[in-house]
Image: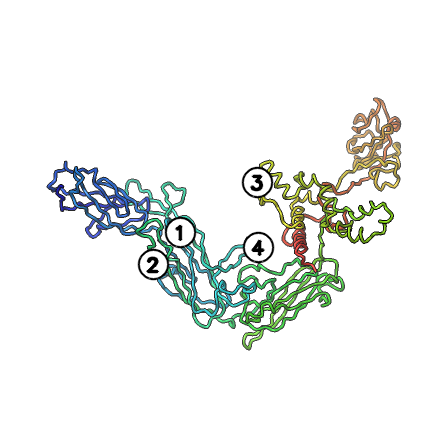
Amino acid sequence: MSNIATDFATFDVLDYKNESPTTKDEAVLSSYNLSITPLTFKAKIPSETPFKADTFDLSRATFNFGDGTIITGTTATHVYQYPGRYNVKVALRDNNNNAIFASASADVDVYDYIVNTFSIEFPGESSGADGGGKYGKGRLSNLNLSAGEFSDPLSAYIQTPLYQDFQDLNFALSGCDYDNYFNLEPNKFNHLKNYYSFYKKNPLPAMSGSEYVEIQKISLSAENMYVRLSSFGTDLSAKKIIPSNSVHPGSILVGSSGQENIYFKTEEQTAPIYLSFSKDSNNINSRTKDQIEKTNFSTNFSITLSTFVGSTSGQTLSNIEITSTGLGGEGDGVNSFPLSPVQYKGVGIPFVLAPKNSDSYAVKALSAGNPYFKVLSSNHSLTHPLCVVPSQYYTISSISHLVSTFGTDFWYRGLFTFNDSISTYPTILTLSASNDYSFGSTITGLTGAAFLSCFPRNYYDLYKHNEDFDFEQTIKDLRFQEILIDKNIFFTDFIGSIFGGVSSSHALLGKTLYEKIFNFVQNNDDIDFCDVNSLVNLSNMVNQDGLVFNRTNFQDPAQIKRTVDLLSTSYNKFRGTKNKFNENFASRGHIDKETYGKNISSAEINTYTYVVSAETPIVAKEKFSGIYAKLNTYQPLSAATLRDGSTTQYSLSEIGSESPRGSAWGWPLTLPGEYDIGTVNRFYSFHEYNSHIEGTIVDGIIDFVNPQTRLSFNTPLSSLEGNNNIFDRIITDTLFSSLSLFE
């Protein structure tokens, strides 16, 4: 065995800027665990050695970087994937693979460029090096709140290195008189209780506002973070790590970050409460490196603040809010549950009264009396507008027992029912409420109102073509045996109730069967009229992937599906168009002209005296064939003789082969080569034209002739589509019917 020298080999360490420590105290160099910040290690061979240089086998020099990586050579470059302190060793060997210099070692510190941490920025604080608005390391701050009102936004910022999972931010509260919202026993009226919670503010673009939603933890959307080295030519010492984006050359992914504003709310507190925020430190680790498994790379994951919640007595009460559930708009949030402006007679309308302060927050720490209600109508059929509706037409009953165990009486929950005896038309109503609320010895009277329209059931019912079939009468017409003629119980009460008559609902079996058979082609193969399932099937046949709705079969309840099928039709095909045929000339032997010959006068024109007006068409009838022709009277404006200097009137008698405009003034008449008005009279008779269009509705899916269709053909599209418009009311009516909500 060869002798092993006791001298130690040394090595230099260069960072990504190609710089090394300048003093002995800087012998431990640090870097980041990024691919753009490698460390370069160079072995140093002493100049004075008992061994000759040719005894070195430099190819067998090895670096052990302390993370399980070994590289052969006197110079090596290495990137650490994870943070930590690593001991680096080098060894030189002779040609017999014996270490001729004992290994030297040095420590290298590797840091996260993106540290797994978070910060909370509170309102009313300015950013700065001496404290700013971002609090950490256990620093306390006081956050003043009003009872039942949202705090100013608390901005949470989280960042996580690449090799770790992006984490949620947890919160905890101590010293509070109430439970967290998510710890309450499940109850649909929990929002009426006293509780505390954090909230996230979600935008509602369709409602031009936002809503506050309770959250169990602060979950942020992670966004990738990229960096790159700045470019300064060949001057490596000037290079810096700068933020970048995914598309820039040389950029690398270093971690993720997220930011979100959160809000805090609780009821009145007599003593300070304490909020704390933290990450789950048990999950802040590397899952792939054994030596640093379950290692916390940062311990600053808790922030605490103290806060006091001001009393209700300092708030100014403003009005009563009437909602369907008690979930009204808090602060600047939209009222997500107002009383729907579309309601139905005979259906109970639940509502909740809640006092609101001047900032539009519900105030809970109050006592309340029994409210007084007044119902007004703007179109009452019995008396003048905006009258007080007599109580015989409605009922208001309390259903407070459902929330009686909540220990507060600021609310009132009731049921409003408007009966159908007042009118067969929609009734525009105002539900007005007033009540006294007390806090201690202070009593405040408040008022509020909700506006709605009550519709009769099936007010906008729609019937398709061929849904007017009288199945009951058809069966009766087939009872030829005399013994069956008076069997009304069977044919009317039994057959009629199952299959329906002419005035029955379209949902009955007889009308449904008839319509599906008669409209089979239209319902299945006509892209303009077919139902949703057939439309999906047709799109699949042509490999059309551009449809924006769910392509699965629509299997909802029959009446809801029917409504969707109808309302998914284009407006022109839903409504149809009026038949504009205006050349109904042949009377077909009829005299009354109720059906035939509407566009022609019965009496013939005296061709020798009739004066043609350029804007008034006339009709020519060929006597031999009985063919009619509508004549364009605008063509012969240059007739030979105009009447009394007029430029638009001329005598019919002037027609002839010698007229300035040529043969028959351009009219589609078959005449000999030489003719005058006398010759024309042998071949044609002339009649005045009656302007009238046929007017029946064609090319539509709705049968407007059916008296059970309660929608006018002339209803514009603007009245059909949109919130609370006719289509909305039809859908609501269908839902109410399908759910058996009508009494």
User: Is there CB contact under 8 Å for labels 1 and 2?
Assistant: no
Choose the circle earlier in sequence order: 1 or 3: 1
Counting from the top left corner in percent of width and height, residue 503 is at 77, 51
> Is residue 308 toward the left or the right of residue 628 in the image?
left
Please tell me which residue lies in front, 647 or 449. 449
Question: Which residue has dot 1 on it?
Answer: 165
Among the two numbered marks 3 and 2 on one chain, the one whose residue lies closer to the N terminus: 2
Return the residue found at the far left: 50
Q: Which residue is mark 2?
A: 299
Tell me if 5 is positioned left or right of 169 in this view: left
From the viewer's perspective, is residue 603 above or below residue 21?
above
Q: For mark 4, what is the residue?
A: 207
Whether residue 301 is visible = yes
Secondary structure at numbered mark 3: loop
Residue highlighted by disc 3: 546
- Return the disc, 2 or 4, that comes first in the chain's sequence: 4
In the picture provided, is 379 more to the left or to the right than 185?
A: right
Residue at 67% in and 38% down: 525
Mark pair 2, 4: CA separation? 44 Å
State which tag comes first along the sequence, 1 or 2: 1
Residue 297 visible in the current orientation:
no
Residue 347 drawn at (x, y percent): 68, 61
| N-terminal-most mark, 4 or 1 | 1
